[in-house]
Amino acid sequence: MGFVNYLVPLRDVARMSELQREDIIFLESMVLLSLPFIWVGFALTIKRLRSSGLPSPLALLFFVPFVNLPFFFLLCLLPARESSVTRADAARPGHYSFQPLLPESRAGSAAIAVLLTVPIGIGAVLLGVNVLSTYGWGLFVALPFTVGFMAALIYGLRQPRSLHDSLGVSYLAITLLGLSLLAFAIEGLLCILMAAVIALPLAGIGGAFGYLAQRRRWVHQGGPVLFSIILIFVPVVQWTEHVAAPAPPIYTVRTAVDVQAPPEVVWKQLVAFSEIPPPKEWLFQAGIAFPIRAEIHGTGVGAERRCVFSTGAFIEPIEVWDEPRRLKFSVITNPPPMEEWTPYSHIAPLHLHGFLVSNGGQFLLTPLPNGGTRLEGTTWYRHSLWPAAYWRLWSDAIIHRIHLRVLEHIREKAENARQTSAPK
């Protein structure tokens, strides 16, 4: 590592066309990580130049390698000067460099607010997902709040706007961000709709705070600093999540049905069940993975069960074979939990791989006094999505529907088998 890496991070590559996929991902990651800090550094450099009475265009030296180091040192030594222009600007709240560039009309201000916040939002999503591999508070809480706040604040910089209009611009910005993620093949429709349940209210809360902030004098006087803080807020939350990386807890979902057949008959159907008819539930038709059939190779502990889903097969080594009372298995291979709906042929967001994982499951058969069986299915799973309480509502509901699809199919087959074998 030396000074040359500052200019040429990939010394073995002479041309952009020679970049490998790993090099491209590395460079994109570095660019995305640097954007918030570039904004903060550039904004503070301009502010320091103005306080020293120097021309603002000198801020371009910020981007000149090696020259920028003595330039920063010089700025640290120069005293601040209060010019007549500075005093006049301080006497006029609401005036700073880029405010006159904003349109006065509501439509024009709304367009600028959206055009500025949506690309920033896309960049934050790419940073959190593709670089830091986090689907958590930064993505689902901090980002929609920040987008709503920035959209409302920018919308009201030139002229004070009403709360109703400010909220409308905030909702417009977060909606266009979601549509952009779909258009650029970053996410699928179903996951965007799931996230929208919490993203829209948070964007509205951010918009309300942005509406209140636009009327504060200190906001107008310290605009660049405020926007710098806002821009680094989401990356800081995402980076904190990436570094902390809390271990996801293990959740349990249990579902039971009563079967009008003895445990011996039910057992034969659950170990390896036949193909289930196509689903009618909207959840599965929207892309959530659903069970199709189950196969088993061998008997007893150590046998391998394969539960085939629409997206692949769960490989399930048998741990407990207590016929006809209990069948328990672990899971060593998980297929994707869903197939995203997208206008493209196929996309594979990171959350489809390793963010929702089944650890194991079991079937418990309890004899009933009427000669039937209570069949209970259990799944132990974990997910790395935060806020965990919100995403667990979805995951528990989905796994419960998967249980019912399997258990009801086993019940139907077991009751038919009992009727067929009953003496006439």
Image (spheres, helix red, strand yellow):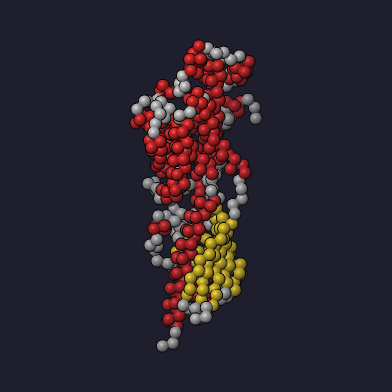
Q: Position of residue 91 (x, y in %)?
A: 48, 17
Picture residue at 55% right of the left edge, 29% below the top:
37
Picture residue at 61% right of the left edge, 14% below the top:
79
Q: Quadrant of the N terminus?
A: top right
Q: Position of residue 283 (x, y in %)?
A: 41, 57
Picture residue at 44% right of the left edge, 77% below the top:
415
Question: Residue farthest to the top?
Answer: 84
Q: Is residue 44 visible?
A: yes
Q: Position of residue 332 (x, y in %)?
A: 57, 59
Q: Position of residue 250 (x, y in %)?
A: 59, 57
Displayed quadrant of residue 289: bottom left
Q: Is residue 223 visible?
A: no
- In the rendered view, does 111 fall on the left or right side of 387? left
Displayed quadrant of residue 301: bottom right
Q: Is residue 329 above or below residue 420?
A: above
Picture residue at 48% right of the left edge, 64% below the top:
403
Q: Nearer the viewer, residue 164 or 29?
A: 164
Q: Is residue 120 above or below residue 141?
A: above
Question: Residue farthest to the right?
Answer: 1
